[in-house]
Image (cartoon, coloured by chain):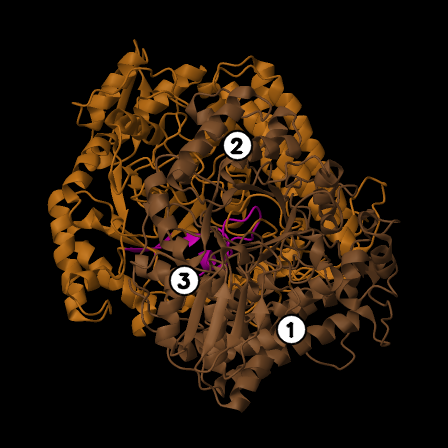
Chain colours: A orange, B brown
Amino acid sequence: MSVKCHTWLPFLGQEIPADLTAPADIARFELEQGGVKASLTVEPAMGEGWQIAKTEDGYALRGGESGVLYGAYQLLMAKQTGAEPQAESAPRYSLRMLNCWDNADGSVERGYAGRSLFFEGGKFDYDPARMRQLARMLASVGLNVLCINNVNVRFPADQLVNTWLPELAELAAIFRPFGVRLMVSIDYSMPMRYGVDTADPLDEDVAQWWKDQAEKVYKVVPDLAGFLVKADSEGRPGPFTYGRNHAEGANMLARALKPHGGVLVWRCFVYNCQQDWRDLTTDRPKAAYEHYAYLDGQFEDNVILQIKNGPFDFQVREPVSPLLYAMPGTVKAIEFQLAQEYTGQQIDIYAMPPMWKEIFDELPADNVQAIAAVTNLGRDDNFTGHPFAAANLFAYGCLAWNPEIVPEEVIRLWAKLTYALPADQEDALVQLLMGSRRTYEKYTSPLGLGWMIYPHHHYGPNPGGYEYTPWGTYHKADRNAVGIDRTAGGTGYLLQYPEELQAKYATPENCPDELKLFYHRLRYDYVMADGRTLIQRIYDDHFEGLAETQAMAEVLAGIDLPSPDREVAAERMHRQLHNAREWCDIINTFFHRLSGVEDAQGRTIYL
Amino acid sequence: MSVKCHTWLPFLGQEIPADLTAPADIARFELEQGGVKASLTVEPAMGEGWQIAKTEDGYALRGGESGVLYGAYQLLMAKQTGAEPQAESAPRYSLRMLNCWDNADGSVERGYAGRSLFFEGGKFDYDPARMRQLARMLASVGLNVLCINNVNVRFPADQLVNTWLPELAELAAIFRPFGVRLMVSIDYSMPMRYGVDTADPLDEDVAQWWKDQAEKVYKVVPDLAGFLVKADSEGRPGPFTYGRNHAEGANMLARALKPHGGVLVWRCFVYNCQQDWRDLTTDRPKAAYEHYAYLDGQFEDNVILQIKNGPFDFQVREPVSPLLYAMPGTVKAIEFQLAQEYTGQQIDIYAMPPMWKEIFDELPADNVQAIAAVTNLGRDDNFTGHPFAAANLFAYGCLAWNPEIVPEEVIRLWAKLTYALPADQEDALVQLLMGSRRTYEKYTSPLGLGWMIYPHHHYGPNPGGYEYTPWGTYHKADRNAVGIDRTAGGTGYLLQYPEELQAKYATPENCPDELKLFYHRLRYDYVMADGRTLIQRIYDDHFEGLAETQAMAEVLAGIDLPSPDREVAAERMHRQLHNAREWCDIINTFFHRLSGVEDAQGRTIYL
């Protein structure tokens, strides 16, 4: 292996020497190869922040220990794009994390960019030069924590906090000079494989086992960011086994980490994945709030609850999770998914910044104190499978630093840095990316329904695929109507929100179109604000989504991307076109079979 | 491993000594342990036939080389059940074959009885004593050919006809004394991995390669029954690649086998598995007839075309394949599937003899000259996963010997031999098995539709699961109607049959209910012969199927099976009950959502 792609930093072509061990040294190395003259002053008290001032022959850059490195990349990117650097900046959130779902066997759960970054064949296996390139990418956008293994921890990945500690320390040493600290996912039941006869969080032996284990870990990796836990979720062990709640479960671990300055990140992805489809009283989106909201104030201060952005699971369109409006006395992280599990699997183009902006337009940024995202990274030469998927990683770093990003600006910055395109082509690429999510949304499931995708695999249309499963994800489309009533008169999900948000979604008339069928069950002849019926709107969206994809393909063909990005993007666009056509035709046929309503414009809907 | 179960031969408890090498020796051994006095006379000219005459102190058994062994088992089974042995018998078909879909890695494609009988970890791996027990079982019901590897031949299974020949010979030597000859599935493209640059059947190098290879094989296993080939099917290589037809493809191989007395069995399971669901002109059931019928008379006389019993793929209910009425100048085998792929996976009880009787009621037995079945065997202690699945293997042997079996008699014979039950319990078991297929049919997909099952896995209800796939298996249910018109006015499939069969199915009024939706597209308000609407009949069948399963469970609980059959059957019945309930409720809900029609009896149909 070697570093074959520098993603958005093609102007930093030299590998970073392995013997640089402080962020300031790396900053100097990078500034020099980038041809930027700057004096560096490290002021530890500035933490991750930085200030840039113009001097006679260059810049004066002051910052905290990693702050100077972040500032250096800002200077370099400004120079590269011909912009003036900002005068100063500091991150909104101190924990800006990537979660890798890498397994010890080298596979990546929901990975669409090749094999694991770190593991192969049940052990660590990576190219240090490529790790340094990855660390450089993360530092360049200010990401500072990397959780390296899948939250579904399977043997032997549990050994990361035991027999693999020497190798963990080696990897941590590679990332440390870039201001990136490692984190590991742990298996909640681990003590039971080491002579403790329970994993009950209130059992003293369990607490002592974790305390001892944390000491061993921090002796070897003193700056480990902490542990990440998925407990009592989709078959994972957890405190429910012992009749304990999740505060009791998390606090026990947090207390083991606290003496070492570590945090305990606890995922709130808990729901009944053995639901009976006949059961109309259980509504999966209500689960996280029900499991956690009442525990507000009971968590140790080094516990962070990690909450998915929506109440389901990274669908194309979901409301903001109601749990993110609750628990004011608890440290919370919002979790996004860069891995395009339900959103095109890095085959279809799907730029996420517009979606994130919508979320933070509705969610006050201070409702959360940290931010995390499942990565879209892998062993592919270009790191992200589709070269454009790197834009999501880049923009996520910007978002984590400052959630008030302007999507188009960030995407343009990525495009400018990555490709030296003529202005019209750069515009075309930026517009293509900016519209890609809305297009994908149009040709997939309608109006906030979600889940019309192939079960398990999560690519391609399968309108009834989740309908009778235990996953709690139903649309219950019949010959007259579709959607779930989640208002006070329905499942009551909407009641989990603050009142002004309840009002926004409570009636089909007020509720934004994009979430109409998430919140309401509507007849096909329901008349939308613009006068179209619901069924006609479904048909129209799908035909538009397909047409827009075809237009995207033409635009893409006219952009002179460098090789191999040109070939990779073209090949994936070929597959996206097929996918969009399948979605459009299958969803339209599905609803036509149910409703019997013909398309008002007489377009072909297949039998 | 050791032989833990003797299936229907519990009265033959001694293992057959490895040093017996002739069927007559085995016959003597078995008769002695079974306490039957008989004089044996081998008359090779009698082939597989036998005659039994009563003598003063026992019986005189005359028969061909394997005929004496078959006759011996008849004597033993008659004694065991207190019946008089038949006076004479000879098999209807000379090739009575089992096809094992065992892979070299030890997995079994569509295997529901554990790992492979023969292989593990990429090589032969079996217990010779268990092989002899299997051979005894086969001989006891007259089966004489065992194809040991999956028709989907993957490396290293192709080595069965190359580097694995010594091991193949060892296995053949175990089965030979039982009158069972081995067969192997081969990979059509194999010459290309040995220096031949094509697999074109008309290429001389290809023909010569197979000729040479056959010589090598027959030098080591001189009585090998032949080769089995799945070509140009579901991704397998074949003559189509070279613009050759299947007569050209099969004949080349047949000529290589002919000098050695081998047959070439060619599977006719060829169809377009990349169909566009939008395409209404292609109809998968038409495929076999279209690919083969015109080739009648062009095959070498040692080619056997192996044709699945129905035109689709071993569904619960299908018409008899039209190809079985065509090609009078060609040697044909009918293929059944004992492995319960679509029929309950040896969890749900599904006795096949009533289905076979229906088929041979419509298909003249002389339309085929050989018979084959995919096995339901595996490494489970009881050989078949569900102990009752052994009844299908037993009955299949009887059917292959004489297709005019009376299902109830054969099932009763199996039950009597296997279990020593009181008469009322034996009756109950026989009736339970006799009705099991009809019950399964009722709670699964309605009236001949098929394919409402989970794709790939083929267990459990998924009414729309195949609807937009490339597999050519659609029901196209909409709010008004369901089914495919396969008559002259529809896809024309029905025109592939002789005229009297066309007449039988041509109108919805004449067409038997069980196949109504296979042949016709009908509105939900279509009125059946008994006055019920189609939709009401769908609801009724499903509720009845569930109720019958619940009744079966009660009956089963009252039968004093020996351990471990009692526990195994009870545990599987628990799963069958769950499965039947899911099927009943999901299929009814699916059609209720489409039709909007309420159940006339007011039973619960879920939303």
Say whether disc 2 or disc 1 marks the residue closer to the N-terminus. 2
Q: Position of residue B212 (x, y in %)?
A: 45, 28
Q: Residues within 10 Å of mark 3 (few under 14, many from 20)?
A: many
Tell me which amino acid carries mark 1.
Val
Q: Position of residue A505 (x, y in %)?
A: 63, 58
Q: Which mark is residue B256?
A: 2
Q: Residues within 10 Å of mark 2 (few under 14, many from 20)?
A: many
Secondary structure beneath label 1: loop
Q: Quadrant of the N terminus of chain B?
A: bottom left
Task: Check the image and report above or below for A347 versus B489.
Answer: above
Tell me which amino acid carries mark 3.
Ala
Q: Is residue A328 magenta?
A: yes
Label 1: chain? B
Q: Which mark is residue B406?
A: 1
Snapshot quadrant of residue A269: bottom left
The structure residue drawn at horizontal position 70% and vertical position 63%, both measured from the top left corner, is B360
Q: Is residue B193 magenta?
A: no
The structure residue drawn at horizontal position 25% and vertical position 22%, both measured from the top left corner, is A27
The structure residue drawn at horizontal position 55% and vertical position 20%, both measured from the top left corner, is B204
Label 3: chain? B
Which of B530/B354 is in front? B354
According to the image, label 3 marks what residue? B24
Magenta residues (range) = A303-332
Q: Position of residue B362 (x, y in %)?
A: 75, 62
Secondary structure beneath label 2: helix
Q: Residues within 10 Å of mark 1 (few under 14, many from 20)?
A: some
Q: CA distance from mark 3 to mark 2?
A: 32 Å
